Amino acid sequence: MKLPLGLPALIFSIKSFAAAVLALWIAFHIGLPNPYWALVTVYVVAQPRVGAVLSKSVYRIVGTMTGAIVSVALVPPLVDAPEILSLAIALWLGLCVFASGIERSSRSYMFALAGYSTCIIVFASVQNPGAIFDTAVARFEEITLGILCSSMIHATVLPGSARELMLSKLDATMQTAARWSADALVIPGDRQLDRDRCRLASDVNEIHELLVHSGFEGAGMPLRKDVVRALLAQVERTLPLSAGVDDRLSELARLGGASHGVVPLVSDIEQWLRQIADGAPHTPGLASAADALRRRCREAEPAVVPGMGWRERLELSLLARLADLIQVNGNALLLRKAMRGDRQRDSERRRIRVLVAGAQRSVERDVAGAAGAAIATTATLYLICLLWIASGWEGGVNGVMLAGVYFSIYANNSDPSLLLRNKFIGVALRLLLGAAYVLIVLPAIDGLPLFVLALAPVLILCGALQTVPRYAPLSFNFIIGTLSPNIISERFEPAFADYLNGGLSTLTGIYLALVAMNLTQSLWTSGAVARTLKAGQHDIARGRFGAGSAAAWRSRMLHRIALTTPRLARDESDGTGTTRDVLRDMMAGLSLAQLAGLHARLEPGGQRRPEAFFLP
């Protein structure tokens, strides 16, 4: 089997290795007590894109500092009451897991880190609680050193740009949305299009994350984030519009097809969308063609008269949505033009201001799921602490600490038990690699140059494999195994028993976390898709689709689709619903929002809240 590694992966790995060597040399030079933390941090924050490295570095510094402060605040007053101290740590860890689950962005890493940093610092001070301040400061120094070395190397040596990746994905997403919209005009009712639209929701969510990372890159032309968000809002609108067009064309096909005046118009719109898909956003003449097509849609609309037939009503609705679909694609082209800095007419600038002002980002927050994960985390860590205290096993502190750390790291994933099982296997394999270093490699070498040379093969190969999602978890395990405390130390001590004891403690901690996860994860993972679907339906029933902004509600519904897609893709047997249901809910809510906008124009006798039709 050929590994998909190229020059970019090798460059990334060499930069990470150089940052690790720099951190190692500085840590040895200034006498940090645990230099392996600096090296581990180098690889934790390493990312191929500068913006991602810098953002993760900032989040890690803030999270580590918060964890250190909480550690220093908790230990001195509670040092003589281990049960209460354990409860305080467990409650803090649970609170951080809750905040991490609520924060649906890369910033969630900061909250999770604040929680398990406290575990790492406090449990490392069990034998000497009076030194908690020194331990917290040392841990912060070691982690900050790794962050600074990684950030400096990745930001200055052949840096990769998160901004360029974001703009590339933005163009690709615009083209893809146009292509799928065109496909809906040719093959209505195709179930594959539903799956494609769900991927579009995930792509938009990913671009929002890249936009956050790109904000940490100061070089180059200033990026107007408000214009990017406005463009993404237009791409979001294509999803319910294309699905609505799909539904109407399917129904018209069942009735024998659209009228002769509509068929050529649909064909021309399909060709116009193909042009966007093939050359967006640079093809000239697309904007003027959009105005002509919208005008044709208005001219083709059947007259609204009493007693209109079902076919005429369908065509009227179809043409209205086709006009909207043309408009949002035209808006996206205009906004992309503004991002390139092209010259704009006064009317275009006014239109851009309107689009920017109307763009809002809103995300789904699964409070029940986050609360379930937090309660389980708190209960798990506290019960394990009580068992450890009752047993009197001094050597079990590492296992207790890691049980809390790994439980909190994976709690907010869609299948935490699977990840913990894979982690257990990965750690077992990395112990074998570390044993080879402890027993064979390190006793045969002396001096920093040879030590660095001995680390190079594993770290460079595994660093390159980190760029491949399929191999990233296992390769990171091998990196951590090579950077074990028994290996990364200023003076090597041939104590294989200590290494083995540390490894068994790690496996014990992961196993305890896995057992607890198997017992408790149904509290928050079971019914996650159903909760998401019901949240949208509840919004519609209570009229929240128009509260504040229909654009914000549409954005939240799209985020719900992005959340449900991976869960349903993993578990096809989940009968609680499909992303198609979320699409239909979104279309229903947006239609009701339009009706709500017309509410004031109705005669008093005909007024009724649109959402009232959904209430008992």
Image (cartoon, grey):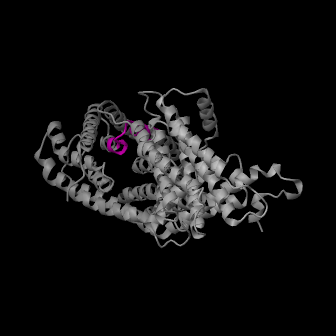
- Residue at 45 percent across and 45 percent down: it is 275
Q: Looking at the image, can residue 339 be seen? A: yes
Q: Looking at the image, can residue 201 be seen? A: no
Front residue of 454/299: it is 299
Check if residue 101 falls in the magenta segment: no
- Where the N terminus falls, by quadrant? bottom left
Give the tally of numbered discs.
0
Q: Is residue 423 above or below residue 54?
A: below
> Residue 435, how many percent across, how many down?
20, 56
Q: Is residue 227 above or below residue 303?
A: above
- Residue at 70 percent across and 46 percent down: it is 548
- Left or right side of 453 for 30: right
Front residue of 109/574: it is 574
Front residue of 68/477: it is 477
Task: Please identify the residue farthest to the left as the structure is shown.
Answer: 444
- Residue 294 lies in quadrant: top right
Check if residue 56 falls in the magenta segment: yes
- Where the C terminus falls, by quadrant? bottom right
- Residue at 52 percent across and 68 percent down: it is 522
- Left or right side of 569 for 16: left
- Residue 439 lies in quadrant: bottom left
> Residue 297, how many percent across, how many down?
62, 49
Span colored in magenta = 41-61
Dominant SS in magenta: helix
Q: Is residue 560 above or below residue 358?
A: below
Task: Please identify the residue farthest to the right as the structure is shown.
Answer: 605
> Residue 71, how many percent across, how many down?
49, 45
Front residue of 213/295: it is 295
